[in-house]
Amino acid sequence: MSAEDNSWRSPPFRQNVVQKIEEAVRSSGMTPSRNSLEMENHVYQKAKTKEEYLGFVARLILHVREIDRCRFPSFIENTVCRKTPETAEEVKENGNVFFTRKMYNEALIFYNKAIQLNNSSAPFFGNRSACYMMLGNYSKAAVDASSSILIDPAYIKGHVRLLKCYIALGEVSSATETLQKIQSMESVSNSVQNEVEILNTLKSKTRDVLKAMESKNYAAAIPLINTALSIAPASSNFNFMKAECHVHLHQFNEAKTLANKIKEVDQSTSVFICGLCFYYEGNIEMAITCFETSNFPSKSPNLQKSVDFFKKALEFRKLKSEGNQMFERGQLAAAYELYSKGLNIDPTNKAANSKLYFNRGTVNFRLNKLKDAVLDFSQAIDFDNNYFKALTKRGQCYIKLNEYEKAVYDFEKVFKNEPTYENKKMLDDAKAMATQSKRKDYYRILGLAKTATSDEIKKAYRKLALVHHPDRHVNSSETEKVNEEKKFKELGEAYAVLSDPVKKVDYDRTILLYNAPTHRYTHTHTHPPSAPTSAGPSASVFMSRATAFWKTGSYTQAREAAMEAISRDPLCIGAYLCILKCHIATGDIGSAESLVSQLRRNHRLPNNVPDLKILQRLKHLNTAAEKHLNNSQHLLALRLIKEARDIAPASIVLKLWAAECLLYLKQELEAKKVLETIGLAETHYLAPHLRYVSGLLHYLKCEFDQAIFILSHKGKPSPLLYAQRCEELAQRAKNLKLIKESANDAYSKVQYDKAIALYTQALRLDPRLAKYNSVIFANRGAAHFQLKNFKACISDCSQALRQDPSYQKALLRRAQCHTELQNYTVAHRDYSALYSLSQNPEHKDLMLRSAELAAHNKSVVNVDSDEDDSIDISKIKKSSRQTKMGEYIGKNLRKRTRQNYKVDSGSENNETDSEKASSPKKSKNSSSDEETVSNEEVGSKSETTEPCSSKKPSEKTCTSKSTKKPAKKTVGNKKGRNARKVKCVSSSESESSAEASIQSMSESESSDSEEIFVKKTIGKKRSKVTIDSDSDVDLSEIKNSYRTRVISSKKKFSEYKYKKVVGGGRKK
């Protein structure tokens, strides 16, 4: 057995083996101490290959009676799982064990091995032949049975098995010869009497099937073939005849199912049946491929059939290809001959012949042989009822032959199957021509122009009357007599109308009205009357209905009512204008312009019609909106579309454009509302446009499966632009879905680098998909997290949250990365946001844990101070956000703290306060340095010295070596401002000097300190200060200063206002 066959290790296979062991135990009547599952498990542990495992199982079943009498471990080791070489007989016995338990595939393994060990034993081949028969492989069974007979001609079982194989294969002649040999043997009794009866029945059924096939009664042949197959299930001849019957009955699915069923047993017949299906379906190329690969043996009865069909297919392909080449070169006569030859190859192949008939009909159409073309197209349609291309061409022939009713019938069938704009227009034109053809054109009957005078009319009548008078056709055929008599009556009728001035004027007026292209702006009114009539309601009644319908927004009904008004009064201009308004309201600019041009041509359009300006405005808006839409300027396009929809509220195209713009502007709810107002029945010819917008809605929501389903289309695409967009968007959705699945698959296979590359590629496909890109960013971050690239993971998760701020997975993963990087404060912020979104107890635990870690990690050393003199900066910060006074107090406190910090750090250069005052330039530079210095710089500058200051300005500052940590200065950001925290930390030695410095700054009122404390700084950013030392700041002094400044500002404003009013300034 090959090493790759591990099916024996599967639980279902082992369970089946356990059941067989259990059956053996029960059949032996023994009650072993060990159960079947335990015994099988011991055998399984000892085996290394399937063959070895099955051999152990076979021995276990053979020696199952000895289990109670032996110790179980030694029994397994010595008897069941011994490694000693086996003889061919023992191997065969193992095969018999599985054969009797109907495990034929397993039995076949041992029979093959037994024959390899001893290929001169007839029973070995006989057993394998029986095994093949049970597996349904009668061809191999017949070969093994023949081999057993060759080894031992007296082996009766071999002869009987060979007879059964021939019967199953349907080989009647070989079965008859084998039966005669068996009957000639004296030792054989009546053991084959059953096979004799079966063979006789098979012969009878074979004759019936062949008779039905010769008479081409395929429907009756199928039941007979089924009966024969119940006797000979492996007969390739019967299977082929059954498939042939299905093919001739155009039951191609049944034929292909049969081909797949017999594929493993008879591959040649299976391939040939598939080729036959392709041949009769008209797919000649695939048929040729199948016929080439069907390798029937030389004695097979189907070989000649395969060769014949192969030749026919080649001839079909050759003649059709040559005919197409001649047609493209313009050699129409040669193309006609080649197509005609192709039609004579196989008249039964309707699918292939329908295409040839269509091609020949197209040639006749080009040669202006319209009647012959109609015959060819009709034949093509008879062979293929769904050949709508032939229906369209035949309808065009009928139009040229002036058979408009037949053309309408063909175009209706085409439009019903493919409701496109082009098919709709052809149908409407044909209906209009059919309506006009029912009217008699008296000028055409007399062969005159519409401007003919009375004398010309009289001369033409007399001339034609002499030609078509019945007395001149007495000796003609009956058909000609009827035709000439009909023409003579038409001449008389035409002359009676045109010779009378009053009737002629009415007739001319009617002609002008009928020239109006009503078929372009109505779909229901197909039979306008030939003259005004007073029967039924008057035109004013229908006009009232049309006006009411138009006001309620029922534009289709309003148009129909207006057409009825025109039928009552052809001169009703109001009805034409109502139809024009309906066209404008529905956005049908083409029909509106056609109607306007026709009315102008007939001089029936009133001057100064306001609808004309509205129509021009609508046309301009449509053109501009489409231009902006194609340039992806969706906001501008939407504004124009809204204005256009005010003019044409029922325009489907405008609704679709508006929905498209809203989707691109991420206003999905508004787009859905617009799409819900569109009826599917009204948009059958705009199907690609509607599919594109609906698919775009699902695409932008990342519902790719639904988008692909909607965007896939059938039939002739129209409009072409949106059909192409549908294909492009569907392909883009497939690409997005595929690359995401590939990346996820790589991630699941622990191929993180490959997954990252695929996720990166996915992010480049469409940046508009915020939801999709947020998932991709998060997934790429997960891959980075697995690779311990925490910073990259944080970046990707942040990008995901920018796309979707409520994405919980990205928040959780970013918080985990910050935790890994020991950024506990930031991690706590993410966990808090995550818990506020999910309210999950687990997330709450993570938030609390991160808060503990952040608090533990925060290292701020506070300077010892008295409770009485301490200042709570957090309260001042809160106050500064609530009241203006608090803001002023907080600002002054921060200034004083910065000054204290300057004084402390100023002692670093061994300067006195008086020296600072005498050199303001240097003090300014020092202040500038303070604003730009970083944490590291502060630490490095104050690393060796500790600031000291005296209480009086006249005293000098002193320097001393610092034994504690230097003063720290931290910079942070809050609410977009560069806030700066200064933490003053001093040792017990410098505590008194710092306190004295703060006190001296509060008591002294020198000009330098006052300038720093009081002067309002404009253009500088505020600083956030944290003071942990003692301070003697007088809050009442700051409050009083604040009140004084406010009162002074109010007085100045009042004086300014008074001067502006008194001085003549304009009061605003």
Image (tube, grey):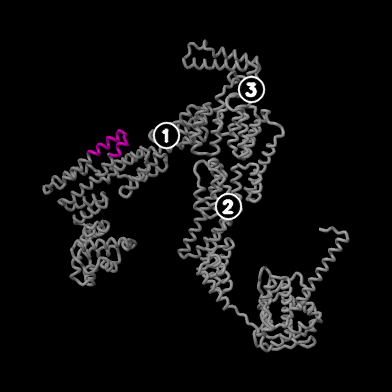
Q: How many marks?
A: 3
> Mark 1 to mark 3: distance in Å?
48 Å
Residue position marked by numbered label 1 in the rendering: 383
Span of residues in magenta: 204-223
Helix, strand or loop status at disc 2: helix
Residue at point 58% right, 73% down? 825
Nearest to the observer: residue 753 or residue 252: 252
Q: Position of residue 856 (x, y in %)?
A: 57, 78
Residue position marked by numbered label 2 in the rendering: 669
Q: Mark 1 or 3 closer to N-term? A: 1
Q: Mark 2 or 3 closer to N-term? A: 3
Q: Quadrant of the N terminus?
A: bottom left
- Disc 1 vs disc 3: Cβ atoms closer than 8 Å? no
Examine the structure image and report whether residue 216 is included in the region drawn in magenta: yes
Marker disc for residue 508: 3
Nearest to the observer: residue 583 or residue 869: 869
Look at label 1 and name its amino acid. Answer: Phe
> Quarter-wise, where is residue 434 in the image?
top right
* Above or below for 482 versus 675: above
